[in-house]
Amino acid sequence: MRRVHRKKSSLDFILPFLILVSLGVIAVMGFQLWNNWGNQGKADAYFYVVDGRARILPYGQSEWDNAFSGTKLLIGDSLKTSPLGRVVMNFFNETIIRMDRDTAISLVDLSNDIDSEEIYLSLDNGSIWVAGIKSDGVKDSTYQVRTKNMLVTATGTVFAVESTDAQVVRVLDGDVNVDIYVKSGEDERIADSINVGVGQQLTLDDAAIKAFEENNSISVLSAISDEFKETEWYKWNIREDKAPTDFSVASGDFMLNEEDASGDVTDEDNDESEDEVDEDNDEDNNEDNDEEEQTEEESESLLSLEAPVISSPSFTVTDKSSFQISGTVQSGVAQVEVVHNGEGYMLGAFEKGDTSWSYNVNESFGNLVEGANTYTVYAYDEDGNRSEADTLIISYDKPDVEEETVDDETAAEELAAEEEPTTDVEEEDDPGISYGF
């Protein structure tokens, strides 16, 4: 029989080439996948509840849960502190980010590659302090914080971001770049990009945002205010930067290292597990009921927290440069806050269980200004729940300088001495950390 040879088509030559190309693409993608998988777990972030309480909203869920120290924060998770709470976040490269009271953030991105690393947070409200560290051998180390109208970008520096009545960036070391976003129809655009150097602060209030929206030139840079440096938040962060507290030591029971997680399970462990099955099942069956009861108890606690009562002074108009506001609260109140014209102050002399409180007012303290002065008083329980408010409005008719008496000055000095906090810790110089201002 005669064999007939089929003439090869062009596809017969191209097909082996396509197969080789496909295998190469698969190999490259496989290597990238393996490399990314190998880097997983190296870009970790854990948080620790330093004071008060905190809540966490895991990514994809709709209900906030209680947050416990030593918990790993994942991309997409949200975290918020109570009005009395503070949280410290420790990142894979020893970067530390601290959350002040009544602050909410979301972890947008977290990455750690061979040549670069990134930490990206969204600050919904409140204040955070970033002490950035750059890993050895990494070329690019980027820290970003997004507020409603700002994107703060830094590389290995110390800065603070605030989003309350105004959006503020304060730089303690190094410098940062701030992109200012404004509305442009249904979208948003970058109105300006500003570099903020060490010792400077950028303040973005409603008037500044409106000016940027109208493409007007406006100055938003200034030196970090002395008022901010006098706050307890600033002083606490400075102390922590000089000598960071290892909060993981107090929270070690919540953390599980890789060796513990991969340890062998013995027969004895299995026997103990079998003995506990029934108990665990009972706990699981009652878990929903316990959560409902806890929610009801929290609601009842909030509803039962009565508003403080302002009992004195009785006047609403005065020419005195100093006086005292006092009142009462129900038993069991943990803290009392007085807000003067939007600026809050926790009464340091008030202790849990007290039923009376007092607040010293003095023009030299800054809590008495000419014209209307609004004093709003809140009570807090130990869980950080806040009561309704009692409000006092006093109009200050400032006298002429000649009418000021020596007695008024003496009284002001005495009130200032009473207002001095008794728990201040003397800061020691540490040559290991310096700030550029």
Image: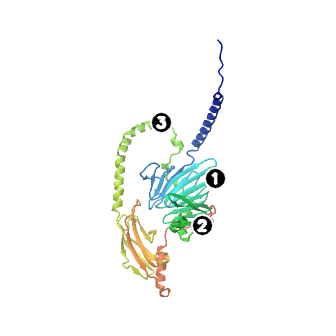
Mark 1, residue position: 140
Q: Amino acid at mark 1?
A: Asp
The N terminus lies in quadrant: top right
Mark 3, residue position: 266
Q: Amino acid at mark 3?
A: Thr
Is label 2 in a helix, a strand or a loop? strand
Q: Which quarter of the figure has residue 95?
A: bottom right
Is label 1 in a helix, a strand or a loop? strand
- Dot in front, 1 or 3: 1
Percent coordinates x, y for residue 337 in the rendering: 42, 68
Q: Residue at x 45, y 38 (%)?
A: 269
Tell me the distance, in whole angstroms, between the alpha carbons under discs 2 and 1.
Answer: 24 Å
Percent coordinates x, y for residue 173 in the rendering: 61, 62
| Left or right: residue 417 compared with residue 174 | left
Decide: is 153 above or below 424.
Answer: above
Is label 3 in a helix, a strand or a loop? loop
Binning the other alpha carbons within 10 Å of mark 3 as few (below 14), some (14 to 19) or many (20 upward) gives few
Q: Amino acid at mark 2?
A: Gln
Tell me the distance, in whole angstroms, between the alpha carbons under discs 1 and 3.
Answer: 46 Å
Residue 416 - label? none
Name the one closer to the observer, 428 or 151. 151
Percent coordinates x, y for residue 12 in the rendering: 64, 27
Is residue 249 in sight in this rendering?
A: no
Is residue 395 in sight in this rendering?
A: yes
Decide: is 401 above or below 298.
Answer: below
Binning the other alpha carbons within 10 Å of mark 2 as few (below 14), some (14 to 19) or many (20 upward) gives many
Residue 200 - label? 2
**CB-based contact (under 8 Å), mark 1 and mark 3:** no
Name the one closer to the observer, 285 or 25. 25
The C terminus lies in quadrant: bottom right
